[in-house]
């Protein structure tokens, strides 16, 4: 069945810079902002933009990601003609099949999936960004410019520009140069890793790139530079809303803290809902001696201690006299009575014993040091976890 | 899996609920921040593996239809069986006008009941909050060898006035039914939830119809016991409350602030399912305070909240002070407003600085969509 535009969501990377958090689950499934998982943002953006075919490319630790996406029902993507599709690497007759070896290779290997829909345009998304964007508007610009590729860009402070892929454009947004992480950036337009391609054109480049033994099979490093070299029509799509890459512990913590400022990104806006698959839990309970200020709390929580400037996912328990400051508590974790958790990320199902101390506030001389307790990890009663620690769960499988 | 078919009575709205049931029946009253009363009946059945369920409705059922949808949220959207809505006029022998009694409602669905494939039914009230272990109740039903089993408590419970009671004659069965006003003495309180053999139910429906009888206890069950037959019982020990008046409604919601009651009603082994409405977490502002309260997702709290039950999407603006209130979905409380003992129905708006107070025995009910 023909679709004008479909989306391909790259969700197979390991996310190794999140260490313990992605030890056993893929990055897109990391809990975020209380109610959400990272992948809820691109999936909801697709549904809200009217894109109802989303191929989700998975590779690293896919089991929980696969079951989370399921039929796509929570995002309204469970439609007869379309839906959310999990796309793992697969075997081909006469060949052994192979792992996705880069972002471009992952799409290359799924050309048959894309061609099932005979699309004019393909949106390429990644599973590690927090933002709200109307891809339909971006597609309208792509068509208006008769572009071969449109790249969403964000203005960043020039001093930070060397951390991004930077676009140099003329006044209208026509891209004439792209430099990955330039030493001396000549522009402040950073690529957000969100692309719309005219499929016919992308297909040609994917096939050619696959045949190139020197290519790393990567969109930013190979496909985009080759298209520019051949003077294809590349346009920048300026985006001015909230956007964060949450690929590191620090950026994940910062982006969660941003959710505490509804004027920075408004998740309460009902015209652009971000949806998630969530367990049905009773409402959260705030105890008689609890104190809650400037925080996000989710259903199923039971709070008896004090919580400030923190983001709590569902079914988190905070015991009496415990104190949570500037921290992120992921689903089902437990903080015992009298424990103090500061500037920390506590993974799913982790247990912090009574009177334990996890993390510490910055002392003025140092930068903020985030402490991480991985999913399923345990801190003993009275245990002390110094600032900046990365705690893994004990491995039971040897 | 129990050989049971569920029937839920959702046609009734107790008039003592007043404005709370202007647009809905008792079964679709919002309860404990994010549920509807009927969720308890549906979830008990779903958790016991009973997926074929008929819901008898008669009037004001728009809100119920909206909530139930296809039954998917309770795993009752099945290729065979599943959730069946039984509105009036659904059967050729339905009568026009309000059902005057439970037996009349069942008689209207006689052909539906005659066609069900299970050999027994669980007849469930839609206006009770309890988390029944239906599997255990069914085991007790089989063990008693009786054709009817009453779900009872061994203690009185709140809501809906006096109880029908049963006098046990053994540890599994009872042979006498006591009506309100009857003598005291050891007797079990009926939750008015019954497991009954299909063949017996059909017989009782026919007997009631030919004798112009309308009521389940007074007519059908009394007739059954008169013949010398016994009924089995199962004692439910956890929280239970029936909601037949505004006071019942308020008290049951306040009961949920007690940990023990919540643990009874929401045990992890028997979750209560409800319609999934994906929303954002609740936000507490920099000057907010909250104490002893239950709060659903999607609220935005900048004021202070104490002893309250808040449903989805409630907005409490700066300097507002709420005490002992039950606020349904999308209520907006203006800046500096002060509310005590108020039950606000969906979409009500309280302007800045409004001061309103009911009392613990007589909460102030603000009807759906009103602006104060």
Image: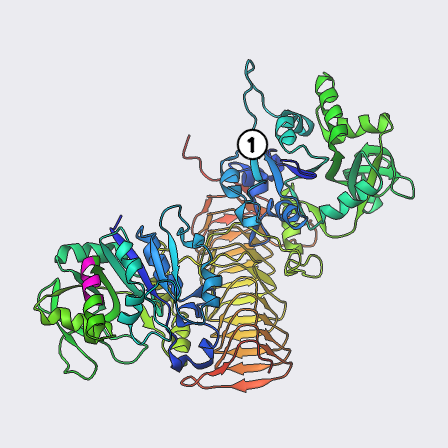
**Foreground residue among B304 and A4:** A4
Query: Image quadrant of residue A199?
Result: top right
**A206 magenta-colored:** no
**B200 magenta-colored:** yes
**As drawn, A46 above or below B132:** above
Q: Magenta residues, as a range?
A: B199-205
At horizontal 81% and vertical 28% (from top left) the residue drawn is A227
**Foreground residue among B29 and B280:** B29
What is the quadrant of the C terminus of chain B in the image?
bottom right
Q: Which residue is mark 1?
A: A60
Question: What secondary structure do most residues of the magenta stretch adopt?
Answer: helix
**As drawn, A156 above or below A19:** below
In the orientation shown, which residue stands out farthest toward the right?
Answer: A171
At horizontal 16% and vertical 60% (from top left) the residue drawn is B147
Tag 1, which chain? A
Residue A32 screen position, x and y as percent: 59, 50
Residue A95 screen position, x and y as percent: 56, 15
At horizontal 31% and vertical 52% (from top left) the residue drawn is B50
At horizontal 40% and vertical 65% (from top left) the residue drawn is B87
**Foreground residue among A148 and A306:** A148
Residue A1 screen position, x and y as percent: 62, 35
Is residue A78 shown left or right of residue A288? right
């Amino acid at each position: 069945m023909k679709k004008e535009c479909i989306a391909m969501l790259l969700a197979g990377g390991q996310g190794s810079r999140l260490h313990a958090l992605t030890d056993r689950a893929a990055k897109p499934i990391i809990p975020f902002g209380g109610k959400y998982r990272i992948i809820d943002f691109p999936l909801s953006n697709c549904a809200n933009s009217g894109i109802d075919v989303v191929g989700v490319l998975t590779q690293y630790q896919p089991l929980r990601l696969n079951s989370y996406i399921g039929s796509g029902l929570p995002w309204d993507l469970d439609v007869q003609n379309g839906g959310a599709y999990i796309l793992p690497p697969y075997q081909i007759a006469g060949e052994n099949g192979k792992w996705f070896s880069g972002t471009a290779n992952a799409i290359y290997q799924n050309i048959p999936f894309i061609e099932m829909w005979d699309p004019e345009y393909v949106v390429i998304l990644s599973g590690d960004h927090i933002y709200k964007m109307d891809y339909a508007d971006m597609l309208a610009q792509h068509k208006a410019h008769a572009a071969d590729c449109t790249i969403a860009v964000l203005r960043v402070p020039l001093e930070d520009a060397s951390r991004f892929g930077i676009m140099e454009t003329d006044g209208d947004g026509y891209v004439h140069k792209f430099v990955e992480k330039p030493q001396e950036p000549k522009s402040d337009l950073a690529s957000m890793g969100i692309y719309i391609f005219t499929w016919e054109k992308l297909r040609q480049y994917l096939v050619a790139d696959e045949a190139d033994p020197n290519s790393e099979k990567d969109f930013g490093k190979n496909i985009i530079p080759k298209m520019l070299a051949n003077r294809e029509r590349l346009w920048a799509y300026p985006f001015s809303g909230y956007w964060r890459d949450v690929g590191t512990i620090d950026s994940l913590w910062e982006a969660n803290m941003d959710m505490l400022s509804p004027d920075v990104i408004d998740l309460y806006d009902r015209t652009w809902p971000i949806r998630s698959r969530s367990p049905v839990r009773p409402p959260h309970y705030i105890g008689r001696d609890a104190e809650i200020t400037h925080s996000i709390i989710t259903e199923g929580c039971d709070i008896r201690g004090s919580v400030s400037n923190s983001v709590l996912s569902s079914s988190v328990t905070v015991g009496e006299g415990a104190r949570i400051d500037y921290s992120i508590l992921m689903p089902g974790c437990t903080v015992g009575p009298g424990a103090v958790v500061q500037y920390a990320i506590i993974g799913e199902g982790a247990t912090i014993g009574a009177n334990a101390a996890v993390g510490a506030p910055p002392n003025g001389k140092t930068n903020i040091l985030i402490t991480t307790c991985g999913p399923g990890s345990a801190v003993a009663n009275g245990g002390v976890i110094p600032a900046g620690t990365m705690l893994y769960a004990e491995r039971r499988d040897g | 899996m129990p050989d049971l078919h569920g029937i839920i009575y959702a046609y009734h709205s107790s008039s003592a609920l007043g404005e709370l049931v202007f647009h809905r029946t008792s079964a679709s009253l919002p309860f404990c921040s994010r549920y509807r009363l009927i969720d308890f009946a549906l979830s008990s059945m779903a958790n016991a593996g009973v997926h074929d369920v008929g819901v008898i409705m008669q009037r004001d059922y728009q809100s119920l239809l909206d909530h139930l949808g296809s039954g998917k949220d309770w795993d009752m959207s099945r290729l065979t069986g599943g959730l069946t809505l039984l509105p009036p006029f659904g059967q050729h022998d339905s009568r026009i006008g309000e059902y005057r009694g439970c037996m009349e409602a069942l008689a209207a669905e006689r052909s539906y009941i005659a066609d069900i494939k299970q050999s027994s039914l669980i007849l469930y009230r839609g206006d009770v909050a309890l988390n029944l272990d239906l599997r255990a109740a069914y085991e007790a039903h089989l063990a008693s060898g009786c054709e009817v089993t009453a779900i009872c408590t061994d203690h009185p419970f709140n809501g809906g006035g006096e109880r029908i009671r049963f006098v046990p004659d053994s540890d599994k069965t009872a042979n006498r039914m006591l009506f309100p006003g009857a003598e005291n003495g050891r007797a079990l309180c009926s939750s008015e939830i019954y497991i009954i053999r299909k063949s017996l139910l059909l017989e009782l429906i026919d007997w009631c119809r030919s004798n112009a009888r309308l009521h389940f206890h007074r007519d059908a069950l009394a007739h059954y016991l008169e013949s010398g037959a016994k009924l089995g019982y199962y004692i439910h020990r956890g929280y239970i409350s029936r909601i037949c008046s505004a006071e019942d409604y308020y008290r049951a919601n306040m009961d949920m602030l007690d940990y023990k009651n919540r643990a009874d009603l929401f045990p992890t082994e028997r979750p209560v399912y409800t319609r999934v409405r994906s929303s954002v977490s609740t936000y507490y502002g920099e000057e907010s305070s909250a104490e002893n309260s239950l709060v659903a997702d999607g609220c935005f709290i900048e004021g202070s909240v104490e002893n309250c039950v808040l449903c989805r999407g409630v907005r409490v603006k700066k300097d507002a002070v709420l005490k002992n209130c039950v606020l349904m979905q999308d209520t907006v409380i203006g800046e500096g407003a002060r509310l005590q003992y108020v039950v606000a129905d969906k979409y009500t708006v309280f302007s800045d600085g409004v001061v309103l107070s009911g009392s613990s025995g007589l909460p102030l009910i603000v009807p759906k969509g009103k602006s104060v």
